[in-house]
Image (cartoon, rainbow, N blue to C red):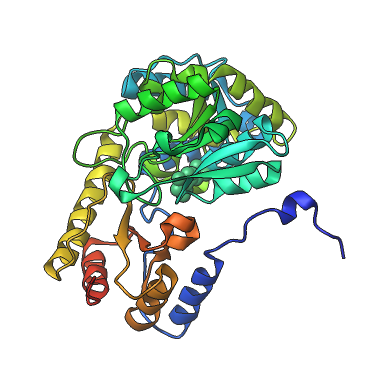
Amino acid sequence: QFKQSDALQRLPTQFFASLVKKVEHLKQAGHDVINLGQGNPDMPTPAHIVEKLKEAAEKPANHKYSPFRGRQELKEATASFYRREYNVDVDPDTEVAILFGAKTGLVEISQCLLNEGDTVLLPDPGYPDYLSGTALAGAHVETMPLVERNHFLPDYHNISREIREKAKLMFLNYPNNPTAAAADRSFFDQTVAFAKQHQIGVVHDFAYGAIGFGSGKPQSFLQSPGAAEVGVEMYTLSKTYNMAGWRVGMAVGNASMIEAVNLLQDHLYVSLFGAVQEAAVHALNSGQRSVQQLVNTYESRRHAFMSSLQASGWDVRAPQGTFFAWLPVPKGYTSEQFADVLLEKCHVAVAPGRGFGEHGEGYVRVGLLDSEERLQEAGKRIAQFPLE
Ligand code: PLP
């Protein structure tokens, strides 16, 4: 038996593995489980993108290795997308790296920029992969609590001088998984100023960049002046075009960070399947009609779910973005206990907030990843439990 490396042993345990098992178990026993515990988009990729893939898969040129660092057309399509959608100028040659989904970039960036013992600032609650990357790099983690009274944004004033001075890198994610909060331009401006003052690199995870409600489209971090001097944004086609299985993502922004990611990737991968890259170019250039439909669907689901909760007396905050709702746990339960009760008694699977960090305790995350009727039903079952 081979012993795992120290780096591997530092990886956090997968908190949700047991939830997946329990759901499977109940399903096998014949129960109709409304599974809102995970973050896997339930809708298919738009047909015109799939058609493009089929066509491109027929071309022998696509059966060979694709160029290292990805196709030029895909980098250019990414730059055009940022110009069109966010009015941000990006140099496709030096400011875009093609990724195997945002996840690889989010994990790799720590290995690219951190040495053992370096300090990194992570949001708590937060997407677990930030912790995986920093653990592999052997970095020291300081958390930035995301609490409701500060709209689930980190409060930079609460970071001690010592930590500010030590920190090399920070991770942010808006629209936010799991809290469903959004960030506005002034928060990102403040972030750029903070990062410049303390020479902290910023990694903004923009996985839900397409999914915002109410006050308009989510802000890109790169819209703040000077953002590309201090950070990168990780984008992905997974949610925007329901392409989670295709594994197409991109890092956009600071040229030295992009070069570092490319350099590491030169040693890990050649590049994505050429046909996937062609279809990704097509998706990015295809305008926003399918994206608007997607947002409308999530907006209707959000409405169905929130009104069902409200009708049963749960007056809780509505999501501002993403396809999640972040609900408080009724008095007397921990997040894990409440998730267990919902699953076992009501056959509704949700993710316990504790799985996203210490400050996720007191909440559960609900994925709006089923039909309106099913979400209404789930809302009814959840709100049987009085909040107070
Ligand atoms: N970042 C966040 C916050 C996510 O929720 C997810 C997926 O669930 C990802 C990144 C991963 O994106 P990708 O599919 O591009 O790897």
Can residue 247 be seen from the camera position used here?
no
Q: Which one is in front, 312 or 36?
A: 312
Find residue 274 and report its image quarter.
Answer: top right
| Quadrant position of residue 306 | bottom left
Report the residue at 25% width, 38% height from top.
292
Quadrant, the N terminus: bottom right
Relative vertical location of residue 151 with respect to residue 90 in this rendering, above or below: below
Pick out the residue farthest to the right: 1
Instruction: Decide if residue 354 is in sight here.
Output: yes
Which quadrant of the figure contains the C terminus?
bottom left
- Report the residue at 60% width, 24% height from top: 257
Residue 207 in the image, given as x and y percentages of width and height: 43, 40
**Residue 58 x, y percent position in the rendering:** 56, 37
- All told, the count of numbered labels is 0
The answer to which quarter of the image holds residue 32 is bottom left
- Hey, which residue is sitting farthest front in the picture? 161
**Residue at image location 33% in from the left, 48% down from the top:** 180
Question: Does 266 sit left or right of 195 as displayed?
Answer: right
Farthest residue, direction bottom: 29
Q: Position of residue 265 (x, y in %)?
A: 68, 32
> Residue 317 at x, y = what percent?
22, 54
For the residue pair 110 and 331, the one nearer the viewer reads as 331
Q: Is residue 310 left or right of residue 115?
A: left
